[in-house]
Image (cartoon, rainbow, N blue to C red):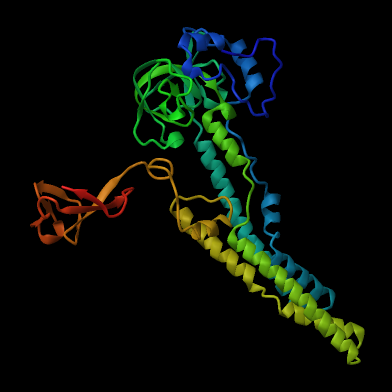
């Protein structure tokens, strides 16, 4: 067992915390865990202890990604090579006296950037609203009294009381449990609830088999109990996952790569064309200024002004359609990534799916039948056949199941 002595230096709240209490609390008896955390399980922490630990370990929050500012969202709209090329072409057209052409190009650039800016700004606001709605409260024992506090205020050593329907807001070592069960699908992918108790386990027990631990982000589905907080914020198991996600390097989508490649090729081709036309005009005896103006006019005409607008409108339309289906996307380019996804690989029901399996259709003897009821052995009621039973084929017949969360064409032998 190991814990921070009272006189240890405080850790900055902004730095990751590897472990805030004894290592592997699941392999230590409850009495040893609460002793290491210096807390009386019958009284909880005192206000002084809470304040001290809050300073040392910070708030019980996952890695917080700073919200994108309006300026950052606006600047992102001008990072495309095609958009920059159009802006440069408009500026050159105005500089050489073609005011109408230059203003038209700049208006196209502003329309494109405006659509992208408004769409991403609304999505960012929606994401922030969802985060505020997701904040929960927790019942803790402090100074011999029950208190309901925001989950962000939990500290290591808090005694947390939980019952069916509660969301676990920190990593807890179970001290007492009465028919306590938790759904850990969000963390382990296991769809079925896991029974919890206070028994001591071996040190090398994997996370999904730690029956004396409750983890942040999971839900209590049955029973009641209490536990002591052994990790908060980024030191929790869920916090470590969030840390990996938040430190992942952003990558360009295939569409962004193709548009940038097209913009680069266009810039090179237009530059070469402008130089050749200007050189040809000078050789032909034209005035230098006139030759340059003609070259620039032709170069500007060769740039497709409508390309970025078409791409932005297509992505924005996809974003709005997904929003109507309650899917909020923070960045416009993510729509294209989702649109090109052909295969999704996941471990099991509950991680990315709705955590339920429902049979909606049977295929019997080549006929597709919706699930209505099983009338008797060897027969299935088909509402499309005026209530007449369909022979399932007797012993050894193959019945295929189709439905949500069910593998297609899964044969079941009767």
Would you say 133 lies left or right of 303 here?
left
Seen at 69% across and 67% down, the residue is: 82
Residue 371 x, y percent position in the rendering: 20, 51
Residue 282 x, y percent position in the rendering: 90, 87
Q: Nearer the viewer, residue 291 or 17?
A: 17
Would you say 332 lies left or right of 80 here?
left
Would you say 306 lies left or right of 407 here?
right
| In the rendered image, the vertical position of residue 175 relative to residue 378, given as above or below | above
| In the rendered image, the vertical position of residue 317 relative to residue 5, given as above or below | below
Residue 351 x, y percent position in the rendering: 43, 41
Q: Nearer the viewer, residue 202 or 39?
A: 202
From this viewpoint, is residue 346 visible? yes
Q: Quadrant of residue 175?
A: top left
Q: Total marks drawn?
A: 0
Q: Quadrant of residue 88?
A: bottom right
Would you say 199 lies left or right of 277 here?
left
| In the rendered image, the vertical position of residue 226 relative to residue 271, given as above or below | above
Quadrant where the image shows the N terminus: top right
From this viewpoint, is residue 296 visible? no
Residue 331 x, y percent position in the rendering: 59, 53
């Amino acid at each position: 067992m190991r814990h921070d002595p009272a006189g240890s230096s405080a850790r900055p709240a902004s730095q990751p915390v590897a472990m805030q209490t004894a290592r592997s609390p699941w392999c230590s008896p409850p009495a040893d865990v609460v002793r290491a955390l210096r807390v009386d399980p019958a009284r909880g922490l005192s206000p002084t202890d809470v304040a001290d630990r809050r300073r040392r370990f910070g708030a019980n929050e996952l890695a917080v990604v700073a919200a994108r500012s309006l300026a950052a969202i606006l600047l992102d709209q001008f990072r495309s090579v095609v958009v920059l090329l159009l802006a440069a072409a408009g500026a050159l057209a105005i500089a050489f006296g073609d005011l109408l052409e230059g203003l038209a190009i700049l208006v196209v650039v502003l329309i494109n950037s405006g659509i992208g800016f408004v769409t991403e700004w609304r999505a960012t606001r929606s994401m922030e609203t969802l985060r505020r709605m997701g904040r929960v409260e927790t019942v803790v024992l402090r100074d011999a009294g029950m208190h309901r506090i925001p989950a962000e205020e939990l500290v290591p050593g808090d005694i947390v009381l939980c019952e069916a329907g509660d969301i676990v807001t920190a990593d807890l070592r179970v001290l007492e449990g009465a028919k306590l069960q938790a759904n850990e699908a969000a963390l382990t992918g296991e769809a079925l609830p896991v029974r919890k108790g206070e028994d001591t386990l071996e040190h090398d027990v994997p996370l999904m088999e730690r029956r004396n631990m409750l983890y942040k982000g999971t839900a209590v589905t049955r029973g009641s109990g209490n536990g002591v907080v052994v990790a908060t914020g980024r030191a929790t198991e869920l916090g470590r996952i969030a840390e990996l996600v938040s430190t992942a390097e952003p990558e360009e989508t295939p569409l962004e790569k193709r548009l940038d490649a097209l913009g680069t090729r266009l810039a090179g081709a237009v530059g070469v064309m402008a130089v050749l036309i200007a050189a040809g005009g000078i050789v032909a005896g034209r005035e230098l200024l006139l030759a340059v103006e003609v070259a620039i006019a032709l170069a500007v005409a060769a740039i497709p002004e409508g390309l970025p607008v078409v791409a932005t409108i297509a992505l924005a339309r996809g974003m709005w359609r997904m929003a109507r289906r309650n899917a909020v996307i923070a960045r416009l380019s993510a729509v294209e990534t989702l649109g090109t996804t052909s295969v999704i690989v996941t471990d099991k029901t509950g991680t990315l799916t709705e955590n339920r399996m429902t049979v909606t259709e049977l295929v019997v003897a080549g006929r597709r039948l919706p699930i209505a009821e099983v009338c008797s052995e060897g027969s299935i009621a088909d509402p499309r056949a005026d209530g007449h039973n369909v022979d399932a084929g007797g012993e050894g017949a193959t019945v295929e199941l189709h439905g949500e969360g069910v593998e297609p064409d899964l044969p079941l032998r009767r």
